[in-house]
Amino acid sequence: MDREQLPFSDVLDKLFSGKDVLVSLVYRLSDMNPEEMEAFEARWAQEPEGRRRIIARHMADISEENFVVDFSPAFLRLLEDASLDVRLAAIEGLWDTSNLAAVAPLISMMRNDNNVAVRAAAASCLGHFVLMAEWGQIQQTIGDGVVNALLEQFERSDGAEAVRRASLESLGNAGHPQVVEYINDAYQHGGEDMQLSAVFAMGRSADGRWAPIIIQEMRSPQSEMRIEAARAAGGIGHSDTVDGLIELLDDDDVEVQLAAIHSLGQIGSDQAYEALAALMDDRDADELHEAVEEAMDEIEWLGGEMDLTLFEWDEDEPGE
């Protein structure tokens, strides 16, 4: 019998028994109907932690690679799991979900979970809903609630730094007027880790005001900061950062180079394309060529997607 034709009860029997977890059967946990969800929850509660961890990890990995599957109802249940690893996998699986039922439990986990890593992961995951609100994809009242919860965590002077950092990074997506002040204060007065998060948030903000700081930090002696600055440059998309990104193509750290390549693809320009093409011709940079090719394709796509000469421009209204 074909796997897709297996009754769901047989799928659960096979998934929760035997030595190995069959990844092919994990896909059947996508888009469960209410009856299937009820059966899944009953079996899940009986399983040992080790097997729950394995299945949750597979679900999170599949979600990252496959945009068609939807494990969100299962992940919502897994957020309540006693296992730290299962909860973290569930949060990771909800990273780009549009299921608004995830908002309240993620806020609750950010505030109340007994593990700092889980609280920080929940704060990071909430940044997606901030961005959705900024783009008008969800009600602004929902976005405001998420922003206020994140502000509450960042403002806690006694809060865990990992949670405060994750909150600031997620707030980078927000148009809240206080966020600019918090990013600047974290960068000017925070420790090294908090400064990294501040630069991360600058990139999330897509605000050109941060370009001078990002350009400066692309020359940081710390490779972690150069990576974050390079990524942030792509986030804000400011042409002034292109020269600095091109310099990073010769960085000693491959991760810095890859971040610069990706951001040049995001920003796009003749100058960026020429620099990437030159790197593509460098036989000593074979390990970078796949990333370079993807970045060049992105620039070509951006350049050819819309022919601006087809539009009639009204010179009296430059903002149109």
Image (cartoon, grey):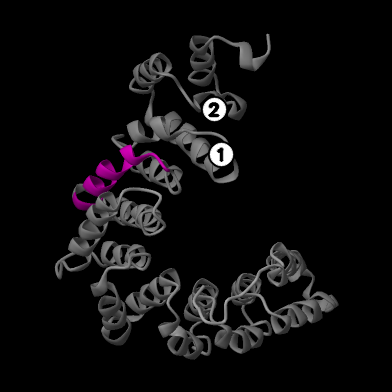
Image location (x, y in percent) of residue 138? 36, 48
Residue topped by disc 1: 62
Residue 193 in which image quadrant: bottom left
Pick whichever, 254 or 132, lies toward us: 132
Seen at 52% across and 78% down, the residue is: 233
Residue 95: percent from the left, percent from the top? Answer: 43, 48
Residue 211 place in picture, x, y as percent: 47, 85
Tell me what residue is drawn at x 32 percent, y 51 percent. Answer: 122
* Labels 1 & 2 near each other (Cβ < 8 A): yes
* Separation of residues labelled 1 and 2 (CA atoms): 9 Å
Q: Which mark is residue 268?
A: none
Q: Secondary structure at mark 1?
A: helix
Residue type at numbered disc 1: Ile
Q: Is residue 280 left or right of residue 121?
A: right
Q: Nearer the viewer, residue 226 or 262?
A: 262
Q: Which residue is mark 2?
A: 26
- Does 127 appear above or below 236? above
The residue under label 2 is which amino acid type? Val
Q: Name the residue: 27% across, 68% down.
A: 176
> Does the segment drawn in magenta span residue 108?
yes
Give the residues in magenta: 98-111
Which quarter of the picture shows residue 299?
bottom right
Q: Is residue 251 visible?
A: no
The answer to which of 68 and 320 lies nearer the viewer is 320
Q: Is residue 242 magenta?
A: no
Which element carries disc 2, helix, strand or loop?
helix
**Quadrant location of the N terminus?**
top right
